[in-house]
Image (cartoon, rainbow, N blue to C red):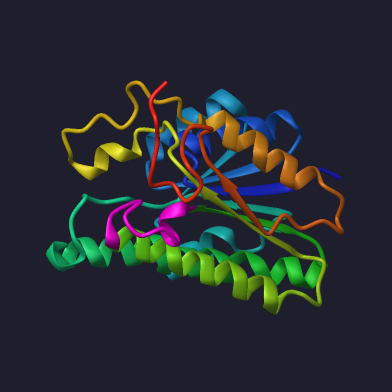
Amino acid sequence: MTATAVVTGATGGIGDAVTRRLVSEGFRVIAVGTRRAALDELCERYGCEGIAADIGDAAAIEAALAGLNADVLVHGAGILGPNLPIHKTPAETISQLIAVNLTGLFNVLRAVVPGMVERQRGTIVLLGSICGNVPGAGPGAYSATKAAMQSIAANLRFELQETPVRVGEIRLGRVRTGIHNQLDMDADFYDGYECILPDDVAATISHMLATPPVVDLSIVEMLPTRQVVGGTRFSKS
């Protein structure tokens, strides 16, 4: 039986790599994103199925994923926002961060997890950040949403501990995806640095899915070799 994987943020750098990898491994991949044209191109390249929906819209996500029996959820959808102090971050930016990074996560989990529990199988992989537990590693408002993701992952795993459903969180360091352009800074966050690549993240997720059902890689901190554990120091090569 072909396993079904839902990948959110599928048209982003990591989402694209994860979609490609899972399709190549025989998964039926449901790619979720907001950009219809980009989704169509993704589906044409890899042979996945695309769903264009705003994860911040509970009704839209519920309708889009209704009746879908997901064996795997890889949740990578999220926004970074500008590099501003918390007290200078505009209300609109805060609302957007919460809508996508938190409300969106809750909406996707609510749509997918009950079916996993009912079928007594499934693996959830949440793509987080070292910003969630390391002050100064990212914009404060964004970091707060990633700290919340860490809490959600831990509590979800606690709530599901009497089921075979696995919950894993990858706390990422710097990945060369282009998302750092959202910081709106002059600094070049990639030039001279040996960053993690999206394919590296996809390979790690593949490993998490391939481990025996009794193994749950609940927290993985994944950083470039030259980025110090904790993430606040990164030397150039």
Residue lying at 73% horizontally and 74% vertically, measured from the top left: 160
- For this view, does 67 lie left or right of residue 137? right
In the image, residue 11 lies in the stretch drawn in magenta: no
- For this view, does 104 lie left or right of residue 187? right
- For this view, does 133 lie left or right of residue 138? right
Residue 107 visible in image: no
x, y percent for residue 74: 60, 50
- For this view, does 73 lie left or right of residue 35? right
**Bounds of the magenta span?**
129-140
x, y percent for residue 111: 58, 67
Question: Which one is nearer the viewer's eye here, 80 or 231?
Answer: 231
Residue 27 in the image: above or below residue 88: above
Residue 13 in the image: above or below residue 9: above
Residue lying at 21% horizontally and 50% vertically, measured from the top left: 82
Residue lying at 55% horizontally and 23% vertically, measured from the top left: 45
x, y percent for residue 183: 23, 44
In the picture, the quarter occupied by the C terminus is top left
Residue 164 in the image: above or below residue 131: below
In the picture, the quarter occupied by the N terminus is top right
Residue lying at 39% horizontally and 41% vertically, measured from the top left: 233
Residue 139 visible in image: yes
